[in-house]
């Protein structure tokens, strides 16, 4: 086991550990903070795969923007153990059923995936900006543009939701 | 190689801290000059020991954690702020290569090939220091400060990102060293080489956004003392407060450096081709620092001139003015580049 | 209404022009104004080393005067206490005994005379009210103290010492009404 292998396993372990802490933390704000940590560790994993662009974009978009909004909302809600709504048995049952089936799907997916041996820094340049750009605008141009249409529809929907209340007042 | 980088890291670290220290002194002096006063002049000659006196005062104050505060997060907040403020300096190219002890010393800790995105990433993470600290102090005013800070940062990051993309499009690289090299010298082919002359609108947008990201006046709503006592650091005292204040000055130094690099040619200066070797390197470093100090002064100048924005005005400016302007500028730049490359022929 | 000072400005809320909406000219104008202040003379002085010259009518710490022979002028008539708008002055009158003629000018004198410097507003009405030219305000500054009690000045601090008289002639003749 060389140094790089050690780092990779350590990072993987830390990532899984902090991801577990997200669901094990009692306080929602702490959960979000562990989620932020998880994103950072995932970015570190990307860097180990020589995908620096993806790593940095992951930090900017997820850790820097989306998680800040999560935290923003949670801080305003002031959630605590006392005023947590009591969920009924039926809801708990449905939740565990849904979660369990997701677990089955995930385990099946992971089982079928290729297991590559950890060899060291992967010599793939797919994560570098230029190659990524080339790929996105040639081979994957259709999925790329379709996903942008998806985002536009989400934006239009958000604006519609925000505007609707005003029309009632008028 | 490792030793060389280590020495460079230590030098840059020390330099950032010393400059931040003296920025606090300089800020008070500048404020005094603008208001026809003298400013601090008691500690040492011209008051030059004032930052040390302030530091000693900060250290000797009682280190206090409020009863209802979340202890670990309360301590973590200022730490994260300081960390994010300091870490950006790793990718700044401080000057051309220096020849020393028989080796070629690169005056940059890491030439990351996604350099400018790294800066944006660190900036976007910087708000966690404020948010965590403010939430942990369990105080309404702190929370208000944090909410203002985070919404402000998210809003202005967009316009900032778009204006950075404009510069990246002009250069064709994300590395700060490449961006500097593309602005080599001062005059070439009948026009200035510095980006500020070819992208004045972009510079303006970027400059306004970096003021907002710094939480500096006129965008210092997150610590606006007339409404929120002290904003996010209301509950802080002693060196933890010192860290917050200090982090602001460190980031002021770093973002002045980034403005100098993106728009004012970094370490390039007029007539740099007539020098070479170590002379060029030293003059380049001096040029970069002159630009940095100029921008630190300008940022202070703005603080002591303009009144604070109202929060709705701030959001208005961010979303309805700066983002459209930056986007239109991006579009026009793209068209010009396409035209120059002969795509319309 | 006609403007008396010629400084009246008519306020209007007409929509801003494009140049005004840009704000940049106004911002640059403001920054030019602050920049000009960089080269102005400082208004502050370094206090303990340099001291500002007081106006001749400056009203600072009080003094209870003695006459030429070193006798206290005050007769404890209480007019200063009545005149005082801040009610800072109190006194207890006493009768002069045999053998005290060199201490007090008239038969009645102030056994205690106290001015509360925290209440005093330094208006100078006590000085105006005094018929015996006993109490005057000088150009001395009331020093800072650590406790409130020490700000109540008794005769020990107010009466001028015999050997170091406080000269008030230069200052008082500007404000004092002369006898006709």
Image: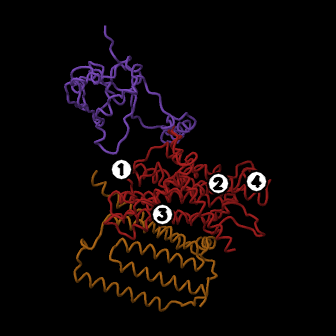
Q: CA distance from mark 2 to mark 1?
A: 36 Å
The residue pinned by badge 1 equals B227
Q: Please tell me if label 4 and label 1 are on a single chain.
A: yes
Q: Kindly identify which chain the residue marked by label 2 belongs to.
A: B
Q: Nearer the viewer, mark 4 or mark 3?
A: 3
The disc, 4 or 1, on the residue closer to the chain's N-terminal end is: 1
The disc, 1 or 3, on the residue closer to the chain's N-terminal end is: 3
Q: Are marks 1 and 3 in contact (CB under 8 Å)?
A: no
Q: Kindly identify which chain the residue marked by label 3 belongs to.
A: B
The residue pinned by badge 4 equals B272
Q: Residues within 10 Å of mark 4 (few under 14, many from 20)?
A: some
Q: Residues within 10 Å of mark 3 (few under 14, many from 20)?
A: many
The disc, 3 or 2, on the residue closer to the chain's N-terminal end is: 3
Q: CA distance from mark 1 to mark 3?
A: 23 Å
| Chain identifier, colour red | B
The residue pinned by badge 2 equals B289
Q: Residues within 10 Å of mark 1 (few under 14, many from 20)?
A: few
| Residue B79 % position (x, y) | 47, 66
The correct choice, above or below, for B318 with respect to C81 in the image is: below
The disc, 2 or 1, on the residue closer to the chain's N-terminal end is: 1
Q: CA distance from mark 2 to mark 4?
A: 16 Å
Task: Report which colour depicts chain A.
Answer: orange
| Residue C115 % position (x, y) | 27, 33
The residue pinned by badge 3 equals B81
């Amino acid at each position: 086991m060389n140094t790089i292998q050690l780092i990779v396993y350590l990072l993987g372990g830390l990532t899984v550990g902090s991801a577990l802490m997200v669901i094990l933390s009692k306080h929602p704000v702490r959960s979000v903070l562990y989620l932020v940590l998880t994103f950072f560790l995932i970015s570190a994993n990307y860097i180990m795969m020589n995908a620096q662009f993806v790593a940095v974009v992951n930090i900017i978009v997820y850790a820097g923007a989306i998680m800040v909004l999560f935290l923003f909302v949670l801080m305003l809600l002031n959630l605590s153990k006392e005023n947590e709504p009591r969920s009924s048995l039926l809801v708990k049952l449905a939740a565990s059923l849904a979660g369990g089936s997701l677990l089955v799907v995930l385990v099946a997916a992971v089982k079928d995936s290729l297991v590559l041996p950890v060899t060291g820094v992967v010599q793939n340049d797919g994560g570098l900006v230029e190659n990524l750009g080339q790929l996105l605008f040639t081979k994957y141009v259709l999925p790329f543009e379709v996903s942008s249409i998806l985002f536009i529809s989400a934006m239009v929907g958000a604006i519609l939701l925000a505007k609707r209340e005003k029309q009632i007042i008028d | 190689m490792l030793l060389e980088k280590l020495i460079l890291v230590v030098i840059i670290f020390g330099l950032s801290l010393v400059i931040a220290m003296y920025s606090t002194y300089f800020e008070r002096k500048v404020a005094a000059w603008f208001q026809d006063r003298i400013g601090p002049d008691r500690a040492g000659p011209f008051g030059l020991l004032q930052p040390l006196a302030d530091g000693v005062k900060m250290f000797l104050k009682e280190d206090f954690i409020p009863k209802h505060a979340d202890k670990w997060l309360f301590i973590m907040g200022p730490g994260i702020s300081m960390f994010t403020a300091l870490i950006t300096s790793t990718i700044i190219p401080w000057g051309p290569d220096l020849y020393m002890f028989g080796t070629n010393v690169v005056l940059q800790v890491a030439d990351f090939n996604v350099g400018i995105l790294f800066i944006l990433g660190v900036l976007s993470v910087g708000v966690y220091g404020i948010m965590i600290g403010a939430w942990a102090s369990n105080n309404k005013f702190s929370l208000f400060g944090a909410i203002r800070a985070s919404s402000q940062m998210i809003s202005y990051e967009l316009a900032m990102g778009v204006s950075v993309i404009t510069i990246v499009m002009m250069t064709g690289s994300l590395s700060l060293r490449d961006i500097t090299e593309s602005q080599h010298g001062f005059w070439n082919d009948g026009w200035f080489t510095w980006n500020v002359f070819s992208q004045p609108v972009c510079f303006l947008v970027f400059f306004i956004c970096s003021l907002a990201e710094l939480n500096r006046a006129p965008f210092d709503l997150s610590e606006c003392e007339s409404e929120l006592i002290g904003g996010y650091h209301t509950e802080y005292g002693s060196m933890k407060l010192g860290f917050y204040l200090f982090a602001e000055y460190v980031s002021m130094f770093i973002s002045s450096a980034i403005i100098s690099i993106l728009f004012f040619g970094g370490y390039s200066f007029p007539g740099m081709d007539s020098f070479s070797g170590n002379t060029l390197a030293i003059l380049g470093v001096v040029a970069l620092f002159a630009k940095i100090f100029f921008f630190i002064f300008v940022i202070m100048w703005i603080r002591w001139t303009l009144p604070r924005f109202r929060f709705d005005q701030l959001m208005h400016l961010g979303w309805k003015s700066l983002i459209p302007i930056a986007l239109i500028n991006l579009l026009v730049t793209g068209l010009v580049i396409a035209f120059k490359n002969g795509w319309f022929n | 209404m006609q403007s008396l000072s010629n400084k009246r400005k008519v306020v209007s809320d007409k929509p801003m022009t494009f140049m005004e909406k840009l704000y940049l000219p106004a911002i640059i104008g403001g920054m030019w104004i602050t920049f000009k202040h960089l080269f102005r003379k400082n208004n502050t002085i370094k206090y303990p080393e340099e001291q500002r010259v007081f106006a001749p009518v400056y009203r600072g710490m009080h003094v209870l005067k003695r006459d030429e022979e070193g006798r206290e002028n005050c007769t404890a008539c209480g007019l200063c206490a009545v005149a005082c708008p801040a009610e800072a002055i109190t006194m207890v009158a006493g009768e002069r005994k045999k053998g005290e003629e060199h201490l007090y000018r008239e038969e009645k004198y102030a056994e205690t005379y106290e001015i509360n410097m925290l209440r005093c507003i330094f208006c100078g009405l006590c000085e105006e009210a005094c018929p015996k030219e006993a109490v005057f305000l000088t150009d001395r500054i009331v020093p800072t103290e650590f406790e409130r009690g020490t700000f109540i000045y008794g005769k020990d601090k107010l009466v001028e010492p015999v050997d170091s008289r406080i000269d008030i002639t230069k200052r008082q003749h500007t404000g004092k009404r002369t006898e006709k």
